[in-house]
Amino acid sequence: MTLTLPALPYAYESLGPFMSRETLEFHHDKHHKAYVDKGNELLVGLGWDQLSLESMMVKAFADPSKAGLFNQLGQHYNHIHFWNWMKGNGGGMKMPQALEKKITEDLGGLDAFRNQFIQAGLTQFGSGWCWLSINNATGKLEISKTANGENPLVHGKTPILGCDVWEHSYYIDYRNARQKYLEAFVDNLINWDYVAELFEKGPVSIAA
Ligand code: MN3
């Protein structure tokens, strides 16, 4: 399939003061668009027109000669969800009950989730992402981190929440203070309704 840049699901100023219009203009209009444009260039001639984004991603991940394409596809997938994982007046620990129960069971409580998620983002060396995913094999929720454009989907997990810790995601608003950005993401930006929607759908397995 051809990649297309989705519109942001909210106005550019709606995540303020935790994520500015300027950050969203650069991050969505320039960085995400660049992944779409470069990805489309690299897809020309592969004959992958009938494949879903997820299938193309898994297929590219399995082929070391397609590492460049993989990072564009992975970043496209990650950002499509990232915009939806945030909303104005979001964050905090008010979430649908079934999700709260599962996080408490598998991760040891909401505070433990908050600490582990922030720590994963903080300790991702260089560019990457931190995640809350369903492990498809065990059914349990897990915290993890990945480098560059990688994501849990290519490791047999179903991501239900992720935070972009590339510097382009926070440098305008937080300079080098990645921890402050991660805290603001968890406390003020997470769209728990979207997280719960992915949780309710359950594990997604993608064949290459
Ligand atoms: Mn990004």
Image (cartoon, rainbow, N blue to C red):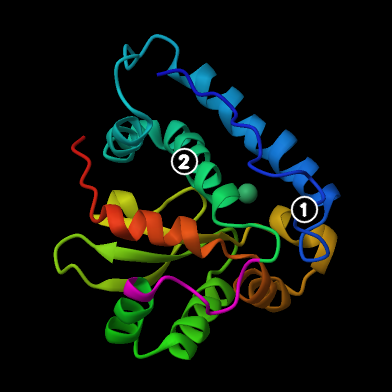
Local packing at callout 1 (Cα closer than 10 Å; few below 14, some 14-19, many 20+) is some
Q: Amino acid at mark 2?
A: Tyr
Image location of residue 169, percent across then percent down: 70, 56
Residue at the image position 33 percent from the left and 27 percent from the top? 52
- What label sits on residue 14 in the rendered view? 1
Asked if residue 94 is among those painted magenta in the image, a careful observer would answer yes
Asked if residue 96 is among those painted magenta in the image, a careful observer would answer yes
Mark 2 and mark 1: span between their CA atoms? 22 Å
The residue to which callout 2 is attached is 77
Left or right: 51 as drawn, with respect to 4: left
Image: 191 above or below 33: below
Image location of residue 109, percent across then percent down: 39, 89
- What label sits on residue 208 in the rendered view? none
Left or right: 142 as drawn, with respect to 7: left
The boundaries of the magenta stretch are 90-98
Q: Mark 2, mark 1: which one is toward the viewer?
A: 1
- Main structural element of the magenta stretch: helix, strand or loop? loop
